[in-house]
Amino acid sequence: MRKSFSAGVGLLFVATLCAPAVLAAEPAKPPPGKGLVFDSSKGNCLACHAMPTIADAEQPGDSGPPLIAMNARFPDIKALRAKIWDATASNPDTFMPPFGKHKVLTEEEIDQIVDFVYGL
């Protein structure tokens, strides 16, 4: 009995030591909205917008405003969503595509982008 108890405690000790390494080995998944923002065939936000707070936002555009302090610029998250859905509703002369109106992005994709961008 004593031998099996010692072996069990030893295995528990080893498992406890290894558990953080196993958990740390799994890379954190980026939020789904980030993938859409970076995807040149979907959101393609980087074609026009800089994202100074995102290290891997390579070669961003500068024709649109930078995506920073979005929750300060859009205190009402619904206004940000409306802008992404159809920017022409508030500015007919904008060159930002109406992603929702033209069905470039689905409702769910727009929600994911809004959630990601709102945190910038």
Image (spheres, grey):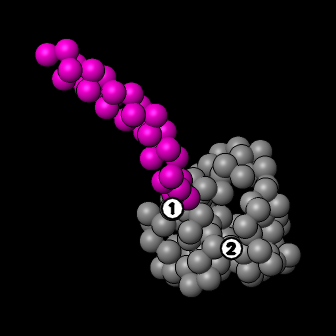
Question: Would you say residue 51 sits in the magenta stretch?
Answer: no
Q: Which residue is mark 1?
A: 32
Q: Earlier in the sequence, mark 1 or mark 2?
A: 1
The residue located at (27%, 20%) in the rendering is: 6
Stretch in magenta: 1-30
Q: Residues within 10 Å of mark 2 (few under 14, many from 20)?
A: many
What kind of element bears circle 1? Answer: helix
Estimate the x, y position of residue 17 in percent, counting from the top left. 46, 34
Estimate the x, y position of residue 14 in percent, counting from the top left. 39, 34
Q: Is residue 115 left or right of residue 9?
A: right
Q: Quadrant of the N terminus?
A: top left
The tag on residue 45 is: 2
| Magenta stretch: dominant secondary structure | helix
Image quadrant where residue 59 sits: bottom right
Mark 1 vs mark 2: give the one in front.
1
Estimate the x, y position of residue 27 in percent, counting from the top left. 53, 56
Question: Would you say residue 24 sits in the magenta stretch?
Answer: yes
Which residue is outermost to the bottom? 41
Asked whether residue 79 appears in the rendered view, the answer is no
The residue located at (51%, 80%) in the rendering is: 104
Q: Residues within 10 Å of mark 1 (few under 14, many from 20)?
A: some
The residue located at (56%, 84%) in the rendering is: 41
Q: Nearer the viewer, residue 60 or 101?
A: 60
Q: Nearer the viewer, residue 46 or 94?
A: 46
